[in-house]
Image: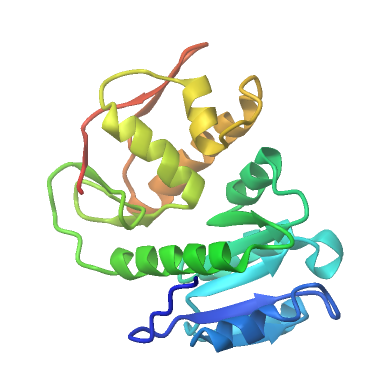
């Protein structure tokens, strides 16, 4: 039985190919009490997103002939993390999930999607976004807020992390000062995935370092231990 939360209004933008299988999703969200709009072209979607009105974008991976990943990247580059992004893919395996999250998606679900799961994930993202807009105090050190997926620098600058970034930082922060095995991090990113495929982890760490530097003006010391894993120091987890 689906949980209805009438005390809050969650706004959802459904981006789908004309005549696609996601036609009923906007109707479902409206039935559940959400505000929902459907778009079928990237131009219309970008126009809709100019106003910070949507909490979550649900994107068909085959949107515009398979350019869904490019659309995710474009949304993140232009609008940052004002909204969460859920990608729906015919192949919901580990590789598809990692690929979607590496380009900035918060979640990747398999099509045909389980509506109860979709609603739960949408609410989870909404709560994270809501919490990420709360006040972050100057703690004098790096801090990670797992409930909101926010990393705060020593001077209080806020960095909103994607789902996969949050999973990795959470594990590193909880083991502060210790080397976390790279295969463990890969398993955390995509349970059941190929543990020997380490390139995606390395790419995520590289992009995360650059993102943190760009958004905070400071560097979080994520140290690489060759053939072993990664470690961070001087970071606290704030429950």
Please state the total of marks drawn on the protein image. Answer: 0
Locate residue 110: give its quadrant: bottom right
Q: Is residue 141 visible?
A: yes
Left or right of 78? Residue 67 is right
Q: Is residue 37 above or below residue 227?
A: below
**Viewer-proximal residue among 187 and 54:** 187
The image position of residue 114, as x and y in percent, is 63, 63
Q: Is residue 27 left or right of residue 217?
A: right
Out of 204 and 131, give the one closest to the viewer: 131
Answer above or below: position of 35 versus 143. below
The residue lying toward the viewer, choosing from 127 and 111, is: 111
Q: Which residue is situated farthest in the top direction here?
A: 227
Residue drawn at the location 76% of the way across and 80% of the way down: 23
Residue 60 picture location, percent across and down: 73, 66
Report whether residue 80 is seen: no
Residue that appears at 45% across and 71% down: 82
Position of residue 157 relative to residue 232, above or below, is: below
């Amino acid at each position: 039985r689906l949980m209805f939360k009438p005390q809050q209004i969650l706004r959802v933008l459904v981006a789908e190919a004309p005549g696609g299988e996601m036609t009923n999703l906007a109707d479902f969200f409206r039935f559940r009490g959400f505000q929902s709009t459907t778009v079928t072209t990237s131009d219309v979607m970008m126009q809709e997103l100019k106003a910070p009105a949507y909490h979550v974008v649900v994107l068909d991976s085959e949107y515009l002939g398979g350019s869904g990943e490019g659309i995710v990247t474009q949304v993140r580059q232009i609008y940052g993390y004002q909204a969460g992004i859920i990608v729906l893919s015919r192949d919901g395996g580990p590789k598809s999930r990692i690929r979607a999250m590496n380009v900035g998606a918060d979640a990747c679900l398999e099509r045909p999607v389980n509506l109860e799961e979709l609603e739960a994930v949408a609410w989870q993202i909404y709560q994270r976004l809501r919490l990420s807009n709360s006040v972050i105090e100057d703690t004098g050190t790096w801090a990670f807020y797992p409930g909101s997926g926010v990393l705060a620098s020593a001077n209080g600058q806020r960095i909103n992390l994607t789902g996969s970034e949050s999973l990795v930082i959470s594990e590193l922060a909880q083991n502060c000062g210790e080397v976390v095995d790279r295969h463990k991090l890969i398993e955390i990113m995509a349970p059941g995935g190929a543990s020997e495929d380490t390139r995606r982890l390395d790419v995520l760490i590289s992009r995360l370092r650059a993102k943190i530097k760009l958004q905070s003006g400071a560097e979080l010391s994520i140290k690489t231990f060759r053939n072993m894993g990664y470690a961070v120091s001087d970071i606290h987890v704030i429950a």
